[in-house]
Amino acid sequence: MLNRLMQSRLRGVMVLALILIILPAFLGNPFHYELVTQMAIIAATVVGLNLLVGYAGQISLGHAGFFGLGAYFTGIATGTYGWPSVPALLVGAVVVGIIAWVVGRPILRLKGHYLSMATLAVGFIIAIILNNERALTGGPDGMPVPAFEVFGWELSTFGQYSLFGLQIEGFQAWYIFASVVLLVAVWFALNLIESPIGRALRSVHGSEVAARVVGVNTAKYKSLVFVISAVYASLMGSLYAHFQGFITPAVASFEFSILFITMVVLGGMGSTFGVILGAVVLKLLPQVLADFQELETVMFGLILMLTMIFMPKGLLPTLTAVVSTKLGKKKAGGAA
């Protein structure tokens, strides 16, 4: 049983890795690389959010706040105080994790609409602080963020690098780096899901009362997964800040939070690879619909609405179920 689970996880990660390796063959210019790099970073963020929403059944409408905190901590630490990038990223994740634990302990006692409103309020508070602390964050105008640096090696979208004897551009190097980060984020999430922690989270999602009856410390596991998802957001926010080179409080906005939660729901709650698909679709749709100009928002909303009506479980789970059904019918027909 354990071997089958390991093989299944490995196959999924290998398929994702193969897609990420092949994808550059279809990317024609730096804008395409920038778009798919953003997809990888945001997809890793929603993989973490899916642990909270899809597996623990806890809603978060302010998750962009943690994303923004990670981005600004790194931006301030490296740009204002001259910290190296990696320590700034890691210390930022620890600080955000502590904040998430302190905030999560009381609000995760709430349920339903009350929990939604509490997490929404957390996101608003963070966004207001980032907007108002002009001396530290630059206020609404934002602030520049230095290039990402590790072991004296600077990763910049404008640089040129040698990889295994090949000369690659900076935007290509960022794509490779973001792809590796996404694979690590997915691998960690898949292992967590199949661990005792993951089983505890699924029991909490099924029924908190039943979980407590069988001895699961529901408060502990809800707080733990809230912290893990916040750390995911902080780390990816830091990388996003370095990649963009400039950040504004929009990275912690309500709109960003709604985008994250929509990616999880659209791709399929409880499906790690599904939420990646959701992130890809929601990042691509505005590009595809750009020619519709003033109808872009209407078309965007209509597509999402129809998807939710006809694919309520999300894109990937629905498509997987359809393919499995067809294959089952073919096998049954062949056997007959």
Image: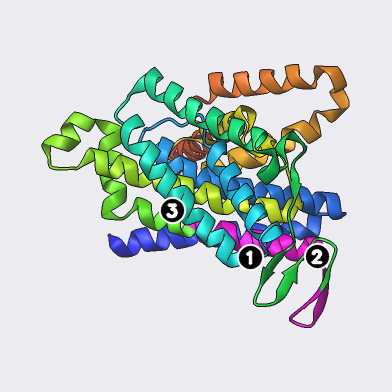
- Residue 77, quarter of picture: bottom right
Is 261 rendered above or below residue 330?
A: above
Q: Determine if the magenta segment contains residue 178.
A: yes
> How many residues crowd around disc 2 within 10 Å: few (fewer than 14), some, or many (20 or more)?
some
- Residue 234 visible here: yes
**Quadrant, the N terminus:** bottom left
Q: Which of marks 1 and 3 is nearer the N terminus?
A: 1
Instruction: Give the main secondary structure of the magenta stretch.
Output: helix
Front one among 253 and 322: 253
**Quadrant, the C terminus:** top left
Disc on res. 131:
none
Q: Distance between the residues labelled 3 and 2?
A: 29 Å
- Residue 271 visible here: no
Which mark's residue is nearer the viewer, 3 or 2? 2
Disc on res. 170:
2
**Helix, strand, or loop for circle 2?**
helix
- Residue 179, quarter of picture: bottom right
- Which residue is located at x 38 percent, y 20 percent? 114
- Which residue is located at x 38 percent, y 58 percent? 191
Q: Tell whether label 2 touches label 3 (CB within 8 Å).
A: no
Q: Which of marks 1 and 2 is nearer the N terminus?
A: 1
Q: Is residue 48 left or right of residue 75?
A: left
Q: In this view, does 66 lie to the left or right of 132?
A: left
Q: How far apart are marks 1 and 3 (CA)?
A: 29 Å
Position in image of residue 127 (x %, y %): 60, 33
Q: Earlier in the sequence, mark 3 or mark 2?
A: 2
Position in image of residue 157 (x %, y %): 80, 60
Amino acid under disc 1: Trp
Which residues fall within the magenta stretch? Answer: 161-186
In the picture of the structure, the residue carrying the numbered disc 1 is 83
